[in-house]
Image (cartoon, rainbow, N blue to C red):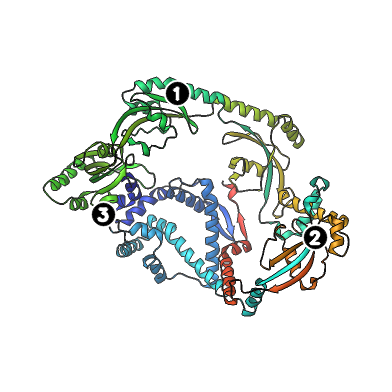
Amino acid sequence: MSLIQQIRERAAWILFGAIAISLLAFILQDYFFNKGHASAGAGTTIGKINGQSIEHEEFEHKVTFYEQMNNGQYSRSMLIPQIWDYMINQTLMDQESEKLGITVTGNEKSDLLFGSNPPQFMQQFFTDPKTGMYDVNTAKKQIGELKNRSNDPNVAGFNEAYIDPLIMQTKAQKYESLITGAIYIPKWMTEKMNADNNSIAKASYVYVPYSSIADSAVKVSTADMEAYIKKHSSQFERDEETRTISYVSFNANPSAADSAAVRNEMEQLKPELASSTDEKAFLSTKSSGNNNYYNSVIGGKEIKQSIKDSLFRLAPGQVYGPYLDGNSYAIAKMVAKQQIPDSATVRHILVATHQQDPNSGTLIRVRDDSAALKRLDSAIALVKSGVPFDSVVVRYTDDPGSKANGGRYENFPSGQMDENFNDFAFTGHVGQTKTVHTAYGYHYVEILGQKGNETGYKIAYLTKPIETSAETDNAANNAASRFAASSRTPQAFQDNAKKDKLLVMPSQEIKENDFTIAGPGESRELVRWIYEHKAGDISEPVNIGNNYVVAMVTGISKKGLASPAAVQQVVEPIVRNEKKAQIILSQKIKGSTLEEISKSAGQEIKTADSISFSAFVIPSLGAEPRFIGAAFNKQLLNKVSAPIAGQMGVFAVKGEGVSGVSNLGQSAEMQQQQTEQMLRQQASQAVTALRKAADIKDYRSKFY
């Protein structure tokens, strides 16, 4: 592992040492510095859970807090629903805990933090980087100091970020234990289940698939779907309003002309790069993106460029390209070639001038150059006086990645260290020592070994992304605006889309607090518009990514039963099959014997053997639970069932026999354990049940 990687992974320990209080202050300082600067809507209610209010100020601080804690890894649009869900769960669990007397005592909290299995955040803060062991004594001491600073806002933030979620999790585990402790399956029931599961059946049947009738022969109306939805209301009950849209998109991706313009620009820069004597300075002035120049040699095996074979044929000073590199054009200059080892082993002492901020990833200064060099000189003097290198490392180095290993990095390939560090390790000779300056500070480096031999390359890359030009963007925007202006009614929307050969796409259900619409992408602006307008309204163009979208509201499903438009893709095929079943039953199923039914239906008699009671699928039929039920129905033994409408067709079944088989691998006791375990897993979703039963008012759309 490289020095840079080691420093990145262990940067928190370099920055904060063993002082957890400083760590907490550092992480939370921006959050509490900004506290009290909420929007004008601060103090208003963003939601209620069983009558208990969640205020906008509190919610917004949590969003900002976790946004900073995650260093922008998650966008606000991702955090807002997650934090909303968390606050609902926390509130519900607090309410239930209060009713049931569930608490977490001080002794329990102490055991959670300092016991044999401490939470991850405690291990992160209090694991000794020298030994890799969790330092429970330091943890107890410093958490104890935090308790004495209860009025410190940084301490309050630590509790909010770490302790409160830990307590909520513990309460939830206790609540779950109360429920799962009541689960019991009687022995007679498991014996019956086990006997059923160890039974097999044989049946003869005639099967008429729904596919034997063309879809075009069956019409499904809105009234048909409404009737089905009402009949199966529990499946289509909605806890909140949803809406649907149809939309057309106007592509604003870079055009061929945009691509050609970037390529031409790179062609013009090619001779300049070839003649440049300072590649790093050239790239910094000509680049608009990430063109960091690695000013050291890298072995061919470590270069991952897809066109590297072409690059390797270049002579020093030659330039290759322009060539496509993802969504960019690139040119590459061979700066130098030389023979280098495949891997190197070194030992070093680092005196840091800069260390990495674990939140922002930027380097922050911790020591000036003169102080660093003076300290390093002292370390070098001890090494040269005969003091063991390992001992000097323990005393002086600021690199935790190699401190426990005497400062050694063993058999690392080229290209993984800071460029100056890499350059010395792979172009110096074994036994050589040197003071090397990197972005992190000053290193005293000794080359201990080098293995293998290969050609190393120093290559400068200049890339420019292919971006949408103003002309291309304006053309897409203008086309979308013209379409929207001439499509002010649903009929005009459809007619113009057909005339302009635009694909009209339906959406999935959209909720009022959604940030993303499947298909168009993330656009809170469009979701807001959808909920501010009525069915049939057409939007102005909305820019989403590299598209301009014009949308029409097509359906509004109020809280309660879903509308046919909202669930059409699910309901319409089911209703169509029901209608096909009626046609098959009235026209194709005649007679009381399988032979008569086979003749009238034009389908042969088939046999299904060794059908397991616990099976979900019948070979050649698919998932047909009603067929399995008929095959095991003892009243149908040697008798033909009435025609049965199944999932994928209509069938008539004649039972041929049910028999027991040897135990299929489970005893009644095992069946009991498995069933109880399954119920316990279902009980682990207790918070979901609490949410369903709760009275939750959600006003987030007023603020976001």
Q: Is residue 487 visible?
A: no
Q: Position of residue 565 (x, y in %)?
A: 73, 47
Secondary element type, mark 3: loop
Q: Which is nearer the N-term, disc 3 or disc 2?
A: 3
Indicate which disc residue 266 carries.
1
Residue of label 3 = 404
Secondary element type, mark 1: helix
Distance from disc 3 to disc 2, alpha carbons, whole Å, reads: 77 Å
Q: Residues within 10 Å of mark 2 (few under 14, many from 20)?
A: some
Q: Residues within 10 Å of mark 1 (few under 14, many from 20)?
A: many
Q: Position of residue 186 (x, y in %)?
A: 62, 78
Outermost residue to the left: 385
Indicate which disc residue 605 carries.
2
Disc 3 marks a residue whose amino acid type is Ala
Distance from disc 2 to disc 1, alpha carbons, whole Å, reads: 72 Å
Q: Depth check: give the residue in front, 275 or 223.
A: 275
Horizontally, is 444 left or right of 253 in the view? left
Q: Depth check: give the residue in front, 292 or 302.
A: 302
Front position among marks 3 and 2: 2
